């Protein structure tokens, strides 16, 4: 029987209930009792409240959320308690764009992994973050090193992406990588019609005319 005091207590923050349930199931199956999911939140306000109430060891945090995004959760989250302990944040996102990764780390996250991660890998990442390590999916570590070394100019990336909503950014990245509309709809839990609407808006805001131009635009900015 696992000693409860040795468990890593986790709050899952994601606006998709189906995804939260899937992550919980993966952690329960792969965690072998070392990870305990104590709460789930769907938006910024709920996340801030539950984190303050449960004081988890690790917050598994989506980057794009209703109410301000993952960075807003970290900004409003509780400070250290009387013993000097504070929740550590691990981003778990469909996005692997440099702008999202670097912005999230600057906001206070200890790590950033993508939703292609396996259950055992996620359990390991949570444990490492709880111990104070920094954890990244392999390709993402280069973004962070490049950014803090000054070889990525984030101002230019931000200016273009600021024209898009959070959902438009997600659609843009998947389309630019070659996903079909049906695949994007499945990945983001939205309808094909909604994907088409977002895609039209993305092309209009970025003054592009085709998927090919969008892919080249995203590749030039290291967003793929």
Image (cartoon, grey):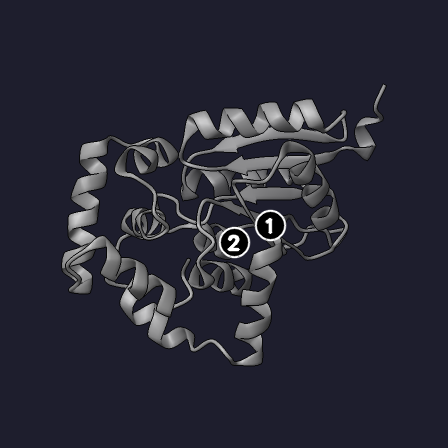
Q: Are marks 2 and 1 in contact (CB under 8 Å)?
A: yes
Which residue, as the protein is rendered here, is positioned at the far top?
1
Residue drawn at x 71%, y 31% as measured from the top left: 35
Q: Earlier in the sequence, mark 2 or mark 1?
A: 2
Question: What is the number of the mark on residue 74?
Answer: 2
Secondary structure beneath disc 2? Answer: helix
Query: Residue 46: percent from the left, percent from the top?
Result: 44, 37
Nearest the camera: 110 or 188?
A: 188
Looking at the rendered structure, the number of numbered marks drawn on it comes to 2
Secondary structure beneath disc 1? Answer: strand
| Structural distance between the alpha carbons of marks 2 and 1 | 8 Å
Q: Is residue 185 above or below residue 172?
A: above
Query: Residue 36: percent from the left, percent from the top?
Result: 68, 29
Q: Is residue 42 above or below residue 32?
A: below
Residue drawn at x 60%, y 52% as measured from the top left: 137
Residue drawn at x 50%, y 29% as measured from the top left: 20
Decide if residue 42 is in sight here. Answer: yes
Residue located beneath label 1 in the image = 89
**Counting other residues with Cα less than 10 Å from the Cα at mark 2, is it few (<14), some (14-19), or many (20 or more)?**
many
């Amino acid at each position: 029987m696992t000693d409860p005091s040795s468990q890593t207590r986790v709050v899952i923050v994601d606006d998709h209930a189906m995804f939260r349930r899937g992550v919980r199931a993966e952690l329960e199956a792969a965690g072998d009792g070392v990870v305990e999911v104590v709460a789930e939140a769907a938006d910024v306000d709920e996340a801030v409240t539950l984190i303050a109430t449960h004081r988890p060891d690790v917050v598994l945090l989506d980057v794009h959320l209703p109410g301000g995004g993952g960075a807003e959760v970290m900004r409003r989250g509780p400070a250290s308690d009387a013993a000097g302990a504070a929740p550590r944040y691990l981003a778990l996102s469909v996005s692997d764009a440099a702008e999202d990764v670097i912005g999230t780390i600057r906001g206070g996250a200890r790590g950033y992994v993508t939703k292609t991660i396996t259950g055992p890998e996620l359990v390991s990442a949570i444990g490492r973050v709880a111990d104070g390590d920094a954890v990244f999916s392999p390709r993402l570590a280069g973004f962070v090193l490049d950014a803090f070394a000054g070889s990525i100019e984030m101002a230019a990336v931000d200016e273009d992406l600021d024209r898009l909503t959070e959902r438009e950014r997600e659609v843009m990245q998947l389309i630019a990588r070659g996903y079909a509309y049906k695949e994007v709809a499945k990945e983001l839990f939205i309808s094909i019609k909604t994907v088409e609407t977002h895609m039209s808006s993305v092309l209009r805001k970025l003054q592009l005319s085709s998927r090919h131009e969008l892919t080249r635009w995203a590749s030039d900015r290291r967003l793929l």
